[in-house]
Image (spheres, grey):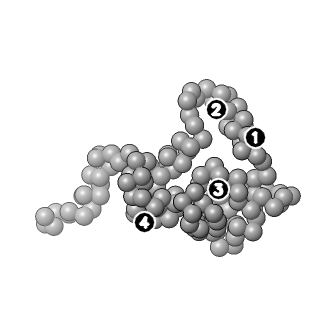
Amino acid sequence: MRRSEILKLTWNDVNLETGIASLFDTKNGDDRHIPLTKTAIQLLSNLTQSSEFVFPISANCLRLAWERCRNKSNIKGLRFHDLRHEAVSRFFEMGLSVPEVALISGHKDVRQLFRYTHLKPENLIAKYSSIFKEGNK
């Protein structure tokens, strides 16, 4: 999710029973519905719903919190947006298809989506092996 989508997310947008978060008025103008991981569902279930918003903080508050975390971890130059970049790369490494990753990330343009990927040729060897088994040449 984009930072703006995280900050706009309300409890009405999150269905913990189905594990779906609905995002409205996104950067590209389309609404989308994304699956939540079991970990995300568990973490969200443990949050107190004291506000309309899931994360009732300002963009500046998030920025400052991110900077504190980054500085404490001694990671130079890591941007909040880099987490999104990393997630997209990991989704592809896990074997999700382009349409599946686009649904989660909200990318309309496949070229933009591929900018986030860092596919490694050595990771394709196992896939090749399973597809092109002995005698399937």
The reply to whether discs 3 and 4 touch (Cβ–Cβ < 8 Å) is no
Location of residue 71 (image quadrant): top right
Residue at image mark 3: 5
Spatial distance from mark 1 to mark 4, Cα to Cα?
Answer: 33 Å
Closer to viewer: mark 1 or mark 4: 1
Closer to viewer: mark 2 or mark 4: 4
Is 41 left, or right, of 1 in this rendering? right
Q: Which amino acid does label 2 sit on?
A: Arg
The reply to whether discs 1 and 4 touch (Cβ–Cβ < 8 Å) is no
At numbered mark 2, what does the secondary structure look like: helix, strand or loop? helix
Spatial distance from mark 1 to mark 2, Cα to Cα?
Answer: 14 Å
Spatial distance from mark 3 to mark 1, Cα to Cα?
Answer: 15 Å
Residue at image mark 2: 70
Residue 120's spot in the image, x, y percent?
Answer: 33, 45
Residue at image mark 4: 99
Residue at image mark 1: 61
The reply to whether discs 2 and 4 touch (Cβ–Cβ < 8 Å) is no
From this view, report whether residue 112 is shown above or below residue 10. Answer: above
Residue at x 35%, y 48% (from the top left corner):
119
Residue 126's spot in the image, x, y percent?
Answer: 29, 54
